[in-house]
Image (cartoon, rainbow, N blue to C red):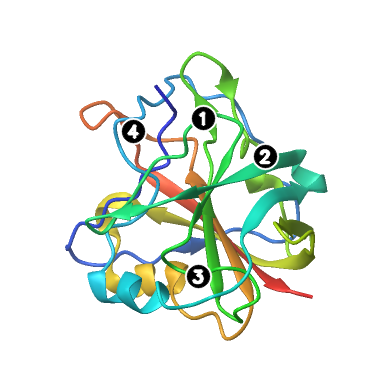
Amino acid sequence: MAACVATVLHRVAPRPAAARDQGGDVPVAPAEVPTTGSRRPGPVIPASATGRARSARGEVPVAIRIPRANVDASVERVDIVDGVMQNPSGPWVVSWYHDLSSLARGQNVVMAGHVDYWDIGPAVFQSLAQLVAGDTIEVVSENDRTFTYAVTWLKDYVVADMTDQDLDEMLGDAGGEALTLITCTIGSWDPEAQEYRERTALRATQI
């Protein structure tokens, strides 16, 4: 089983997402209780959003490199099924949600990865939370084009308090070519749901 990076939308009173301090590193420690992988890596999203994105054409990502987070990983194509973003298939691969957007469309490309894995420990996005504004991310397409992005913000979202506004901030229009990376936030653990209570989302814009 894989570590959870699920974000499930619960329609309750909103709780503001807390932006991380962009001025320095945030230490990452292995989870005391790794997740079970029973949840999925992203929010439940409106069907209309996926319907619009399916008509978009662009370039398919095949690899992602984040030097400052020690990420050099392959990218897999993952579906959104009944409005639910499916899990990455393993600890060292990054999932790309092709239903939302592809590269070179001037839109928000969304990916997810595990922060830890039940029988391995820290996984591909173990150091994602260490990134700060200005750090670079490279995504390579199947046409061997490299798209370079710079981090603009990093935020934590409480799963139980996520709202449509949070989802739009995470998955919606970013005003141009952008990249959003999603993972679990190591910290508070929900023993009943067997998952972390928060998710980390990183936004980067093309440079």
Disc 2/disc 3 C-alpha distance (Å)? 25 Å
The amino acid pointed to by label 1 is: Gly
- Looking at the rendered structure, the secondary structure element under dot 3 is loop
- Residue type, mark 3 in image: Ser
| Left or right: 101 in relation to 135 | left
Residue in the foreground of this view, choosing between 143 and 152: 143
Observer-nearest residue: 111 or 98?
Answer: 98
Q: Check disc 1 and report the residue beneath it.
A: 90
Residue at the location (42% across, 20% down)?
33
Residue bearing the label numbered 3: 101
Quarter of the N terminus within the rendering? top left
**Sequence order check, earlier mark of 4 and 2:** 2
Q: Residue 108 location in percent, x, y?
A: 54, 72
Residue at image position (48%, 77%) is: 56
Q: Is residue 182 above or below residue 168?
A: above
Of marks 2 and 1, which one's residue comes earlier in the chain? 1
| Distance (Cα) linking label 2 and label 1 | 17 Å
Separation of residues labelled 3 and 1 (CA atoms):
22 Å
Which amino acid is tagged 4? Glu
Q: Quadrant of residue 2?
A: top left
Question: How much space separates mark 4 and mark 1, taking CA atoms?
Answer: 17 Å
Rate crowding at label 2 as few (under 14), some (14 to 19) or many (20 or more) other CA atoms within 10 Å.
many
How far, Cα to Cα, is label 3 from label 4? 27 Å
Q: Are marks 3 and 4 in contact (CB under 8 Å)?
A: no
Disc 2 target residue: 127
The circle on residue 195 is 4
In the displayed structure image, the side of residue 177 where residue 99 appears, left or right: left
